Image: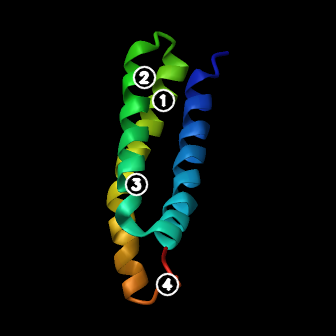
Amino acid sequence: MYFTGLIIGVATFLIIGLFHPIVIKSEYYFGVKCWWVFALMGLAAVVGSLMIADVLWSTLLAVWGASSFWSIGELFEQRERVRRGWFPKREKRD
């Protein structure tokens, strides 16, 4: 039996699930000014994906990169959710 597809599916689910709280905490502590961290992380992951021949690791890096890029938009959406009162707002930002 071949488990590569199953591993990719489960890992993709976990990666996407991991980014949800990361976006929430990032917006809470840093606001949207940390978007460039997600952009750099996404770029590094996508470039790494292009340079790795192994299908499993290349795919997982591509998923990580795509999730990082998607998180940029979610960071700005999170700001709106906070503005609407759906999430708590941090009163003092450094």
Residue 48 in the image, given as x and y percentages of width and height: 43, 22
Scheme of image coloration: rainbow
- Residue receiving disc 3: 71
Closer mark to the observer between disc 1 and disc 4: 4
Mark-to-mark CA distance, 1 and 2: 5 Å
Mark-to-mark CA distance, 3 and 2: 18 Å
Give the structural element (helix, strand or loop) at label 3: helix
Give the structural element (helix, strand or loop) at label 2: helix
The residue positioned farthest toward the top in the image shown: 53
The residue positioned farthest toward the front in the image shown: 94
- Residue receiving disc 4: 89
In which quadrant of the rendered view does residue 35 lie? bottom left
Which three-letter amino acid code belongs to the residue tagged 3? Ser
Quadrant location, the N terminus: top right
- Residue receiving disc 1: 61
Mark-to-mark CA distance, 4 and 2: 36 Å
Mark-to-mark CA distance, 1 and 4: 32 Å
- Residue receiving disc 2: 49
Mark 1 neighbour class, 10 Å CA radius: few under 14, some 14 to 19, many 20 or more: many
Give the structural element (helix, strand or loop) at label 4: loop
Identify whether 91 is placed above or below 15.
Answer: below
Dot 1 or dot 4, earlier in sequence: 1
Mark 2 neighbour class, 10 Å CA radius: few under 14, some 14 to 19, many 20 or more: many
Residue 52 in the image, given as x and y percentages of width and height: 46, 14
